[in-house]
Amino acid sequence: MDAYTSFAQVYDLFMDNVPYEEWAAYVQGILLEYGIEDGLVLDLGCGTGSLTECLARAGYDMIGVDNSEDMLEIAMEKKERSGLDILYLLQDMREFELYGTVRAAVSICDSMNYILAYEDLVQVFRLVNNYLDPGGIFIFDMNTEYKYEILLGEQIFAEDREDGSFIWYNTYSPGERINEYDLTLFVKEGELFRRFQETHYQRAYSPEEVCRAAREAGMEFEACWDAFTRQPVKADSERMYMIFREKGKKGMDK
């Protein structure tokens, strides 16, 4: 799983159309349904901390984990400006370690799709299950195969801004279910632009595969929804939200 490097410098610039406040409100609504009004919450694949900050402002004690030093540097800059008490850890979500348990874990904006191997997906679930409080929940989203194959497919995307621009060559392999993003970036440095290249890979998983991986790790299925609704995933859903519950610790409140 490659970390964001040069793209971190312009990530927020090109993600300014993502309604993080609305996404955070959706996640918080789920947390409240499970009686989680405050306490420690882990954000896996937190990136530049946009959603982490939203949940911190909502009253949660946030821990952000990401394997990109560049993304976390930007998250730390935001933290300094906001004054929010957030702990950021530079760790791979397949190997993360915490000092204790948390009430809930979240992973938003398709971070889980970066887990390319099924065995690694099981390992992430195993770690999350280990670090959740008894009965705690894991909320995450994933891009669907429909989005990768039909909406992204073999296409080229480009965007030009004052401080940066990118060209994105997208390819999707249905056999391997791997989506490849080849990014050419132009990042403004002073009066000039510096060129970078990055390649990112994501994997499409079916809800059935995800449920099987979670069960292997000892977790219990709660829900699978079409993103930002409480409706089942459809054939043309672009993003799905899944919820699993911690299982196995003594004192779990069912």
Image (spheres, helix red, strand yellow):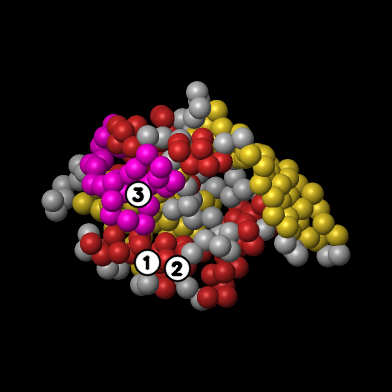
Q: Nearer the viewer, mark 2 or mark 3?
A: 3
The crowd level at tag 3 (other Cα within 10 Å; few <14, some 14-19, many 20+) is: many
Percent x, y of residue 49: 51, 62
Q: Which residues are magenta?
A: 213-242
Dot placed on the residue nearer the N-terminal end, 1 or 3: 1
Q: Quadrant of the N terminus?
A: top right
Residue 173 falls left or right of residue 86: right
Amino acid type, label 1 = Ala
Question: Disc 2 and disc 3: Cα gap in Å?
Answer: 19 Å
Percent x, y of residue 241: 35, 49
Q: Residue at x 50, y 59 (%)?
A: 88
Question: Disc 2 and disc 1: Cα gap in Å?
Answer: 6 Å
Q: Of 86 and 119, which appears nearest the observer?
A: 119
The crowd level at tag 2 (other Cα within 10 Å; few <14, some 14-19, many 20+) is: some
Check if mark 2's residue and mark 1's residue have beta carbons within 8 Å: yes
Q: Is residue 236 magenta?
A: yes
Instruction: Using the image, tell me which numbered label, if any, was put on residue 226.
Output: 3
Q: Of 5 and 12, which appears nearest the observer?
A: 12
Element under disc 2 = helix
Instruction: Using the image, tell me which numbered label, if any, was put on residue 102.
Output: none
Check if mark 2's residue and mark 3's residue have beta carbons within 8 Å: no
Instruction: Using the image, tell me which numbered label, if any, was put on residue 21.
Output: 2
Look at mark 1 in the image and give the residue it sits on. Answer: 25
Check if mark 1's residue and mark 3's residue have beta carbons within 8 Å: no
Q: Of 156 and 161, which appears nearest the observer?
A: 156
Residue 100 falls left or right of residue 222: right
Amino acid type, label 2 = Glu
Amino acid type, label 3 = Asp
Q: Of 143 and 52, which appears nearest the observer?
A: 143
Residue 120 falls left or right of residue 221: right
Q: Is residue 165 magenta?
A: no
